[in-house]
Image (cartoon, rainbow, N blue to C red):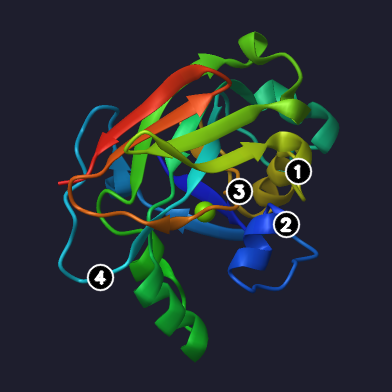
Amino acid sequence: MKIIAIGRNYAAHIAELANERPDKPVVFLKPETAVLKPGMPFYYPDFTQNIHHELELVLKISKPGKYIEKKFAHRYFEEIGLGLDLTARDLQDECKKKGLPWEIAKAFNGSAPMGNFMPVKELGDLNSIDFHLNVNGETRQQGNTSHLLFDFGTILEYVSQFFLLKKGDLIFTGTPAGVGPIQIGDHLEGFIGDKKMLDLEVK
Ligand code: MG
C-alpha cells in the first residue's frame, strides 16, 4: 500500500506559502509507515520544531489501474475520507532551498493520520465537497473541491501514468489554505460537511 499525495492544488494555499502555481500536479509519495490509523495519537517527534497540519480529502483506490483516462477515473475509487498530510515545515523549507527531495519532511512515521471513509455515493457532487479542520474547537482550514486546480479525474489520469494504482492505495488530493503549526496537547477534528470524519490528539 502506498500514499500518493498532490501538493499545491488550491490557489489560496499556494499563495500562503508563496509557491508557484504548477501547470501539472505536484506529486510526492508517503510510505505505509506514514499511516496512523483512525483514533491513534500522534507523538510529536524530536527532529522538527514546526509540524504543520494539512487537511486533505483522500481517495481510496478500489481496483488496480494504470493509464487511467480521466473520464473513467470515477470507477477506481468508491470511498472518500479525510487525512492529514503532516509536514515538518522547517525541514521542508531547508530541502526546498537546497533543491533536495522532501521525504524527510513529508513521509516520516505517522505523517499521515487517517480519518474514516464514506461511500462516494453519499457525497453527491464531487466538485462541491465542503470540508474543514478544527484545532481545539476553532476552525483553521476550510476547503471546497470547486477550488481544486486539478480535479480528482485529472489527478488519477496523471499519477496512474507513473504509478500502478493498487486496491487500498490512498490519494491525498491537496490542502486548502489555513495550514499552521500543531502543538503537543492539540486536538484536531476534520469534517466533511457537518460529519466528523477525523479525530487526532497530539502527544
Ligand atoms: Mg499536502
Say whether residue 22 is left or right of residue 109: right
Mark 1 is surrounded, within 10 Å at the Cα level, by few (under 14), some (14 to 19) or many (20 or more) other residues, namely some
Taking the spot 68% from the left edge, 66% from the top edge, the residue there is: 15
Residue type beneath disc 1: His
Label 4 to label 3, Cα distance in Å? Answer: 22 Å
Q: Marks 1 and 3, Cα distance to the nearest angstrom?
A: 9 Å
Q: Which tag, 1 or 3, sits closer to the chain's start?
A: 1
The answer to whether the residues at label 2 and label 1 have Cβ atoms under 8 Å apart is: yes
Helix, strand or loop at mark 2: helix
Q: What residue type is labelled 3?
A: Pro
> As rendered, which of 163 and 44 lies closer to the eye?
44
Foreground residue among 119 and 68: 119
Identity of the residue furthest to the right in this view: 71
The relative height of residue 72 versus residue 147 in the rendered view (above or below) is above
Q: Mark 1 points at which residue?
A: 147
Q: N-terminal of the two: label 2 or label 4?
A: 2
Residue at the limit of the structure toward the bottom, as seen here: 98
User: Dot 3: within a 10 Å radius of its alpha carbon, few (fewer than 14), some, or many (20 or more) residues?
Assistant: many
Residue under numbered circle 2: 11
Horizontal relation, residue 145 to residue 194: left or right: right
Dots 1, 3 in contact, CB < 8 A: yes
In the image, residue 190 lies at what x, y percent? 44, 31
**Residue 87, above or below 123:** below
Q: Distance between the residues labelled 4 and 1?
A: 31 Å
Which residue is disc 3 drawn over? Answer: 176
Quarter of image, res 49: bottom left
Give the quarter of the image for residue 91.
bottom left
Res. 95 visible in picture? yes
For residue 182, side relative to residue 166 (left or right): left
Q: Which residue is drawn at 71% across and 36% down?
A: 145
Task: Please state the horizontal and vertical placement of residue 98, each as a whole percent of the image.
Answer: 48, 90
